[in-house]
Image (cartoon, rainbow, N blue to C red):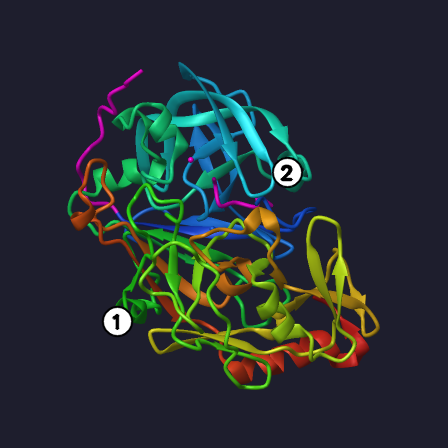
Amino acid sequence: MVSSLLLNIPVIVSAISSTVHAARLPLQGRPSRRLDLGAPASSSVSVATFENLNYFVNLTVGGQVYSTLIDTGSGDLWIYANVSNVTPTGVLDELQYAIGAVEGYIFQAPLSFAGYSIPAQAFVEVQNITNLGSNPRDDGYTAVLGLGPAPYGSTIYRLLGNSTSGLPMMQNIFMQNVISDNYITLLLPRAFDPESPTFGEMTISELIPGKEAIANQTKLPLTFLNATSPGFHWNTATDLDGIIGPDGMPITIKSETTLPLPVTGNGRLVGVFDSGYTLAQVPATLAEAIYSGVKGAHLVSTGSQDLWEVPCDTEVNVTFVFAGQKIFVHPLDMVKSGAPGPINATSHCIGTFQPRGANTASPAFDLIFGIPFLLNAYILLDSDGLTAGASTSQQTPFIQLLSTTDPIEAHNDFVNVRTNAGVLKA
């Protein structure tokens, strides 16, 4: 998967109707051979997962359908294929991720997604891939859709002179929704969990039925100084002492951010919600506090990153707190197999909240809440005010979270999946 957190010819986007349109899209997941890159009234889009690691939707670009990884940690669309019906811009772009990079020229082509049509969507047609760990096609996808806060997280937008010709896909969609609220929501499925749906969902300007309570949750502000700051991602802060460890006690960690963000302080950490990360990235002291007390756990150096190795049948419970709301992380998401296929009671798994390496260090955030966290919360990402040219005072984007994991049911799931009959399956 992409370890995201992207380090970021005028063409008029014409014939875009100003209709009100909401969309629900099924999400499907498929397994990956790598750990990371660096997240009704209309159509239904499926989000699929591959071994509970990568999440995909289908995009139609230039008349062709592409299996597309959704990534809330970056802001651009790229396609690793020769796309038809394109208009060249002559502009070369290199998208740098926390791990690896892709390079190619920026093109524009007709795009269709979830009932929306964009006549000239800008994207990078990738020619060169560096250090992503595997060929995207081998992992079942040919494109990556950046869903970061638009448009300022987009390098295409900047390279095309901050013009409407370079707007990210979601910004173009929101321009069509002149009345609707400009938000997306994600509900990701978990593999091997009897309580988890096979398919998740992504919605545009619409809530998933049965999950409407998210609208009543606290609006968590983004912790950025301005739209051009290096910390401009879908990030917010935990509560003071807002991480509850396996022993039921708060884990007090001092924030390592160096930007003058007013929300940080001892015990209050800034985290990025990034669907492009298979493993959560956390301060080494936090990973140690979570896993070091587990019998048989030990820290292993892989060269590029340290990993906590943990017995697969050990239940580890951690809770994160935002504005008083507790998000309990399912123990199936705290400890996972490092390889596909069945595992047994003597196997060692990897802890999914790992010490972040130098490539994920940032002055703007402490943690990257990757897939292990996102499997436990229905998340709403609202781009309120993030329109091209809007003043800082008009920019009021926010995040809302709704817990989806019940601790008692999660315990029973873990026992059933990991320990029943002595066979561990996930």
Q: Is residue 375 visible?
A: yes
Residue 278 shown left or right of residue 176 in the figure = right
Q: Nearer the viewer, mark 1 or mark 2?
A: 2
Percent of width and height locating residue 6: 48, 41
Screen quadrant of the N terminus? top right
111 in relation to 392, above or below: above
Q: What's the residue at 70%, 60% (across, down)?
A: 307
Q: Looking at the rendering, which quadrant does residue 418 occupy?
A: bottom right
> SS at mark 1?
helix
Number of on-image labels:
2
Residue 239 shown left or right of residue 92 in the figure = left
Q: What's the residue at 27%, 52% (across, down)?
A: 205
Query: Distance from label 1 to label 2 (Cα)?
Result: 39 Å
Most frequent secondary structure within the magenta stretch: loop
* Residue that label 2 marks: 132
- Looking at the image, which is closer to me, 238 or 352? 238
How would you rate the neighbour count of disc 2 (Cα within 10 Å): few for under 14, some for 14-19, many for 20 or more? many
- Looking at the image, which is closer to me, 261 or 109? 261
66 in relation to 309, above or below: above
How would you rate the neighbour count of disc 1 (Cα within 10 Å): few for under 14, some for 14-19, many for 20 or more? few
* Residue that label 1 marks: 216
Earlier-in-chain disc, 1 versus 2: 2
* Residue 20 inside the magenta-drawn segment: yes
Percent of width and height locating residue 105: 48, 19
Magenta residues, start to end: 1-21
Q: What's the residue at 75%, 71% (across, down)?
A: 424
Q: Is residue 333 visible?
A: no
Type of the residue with mark 2: Leu
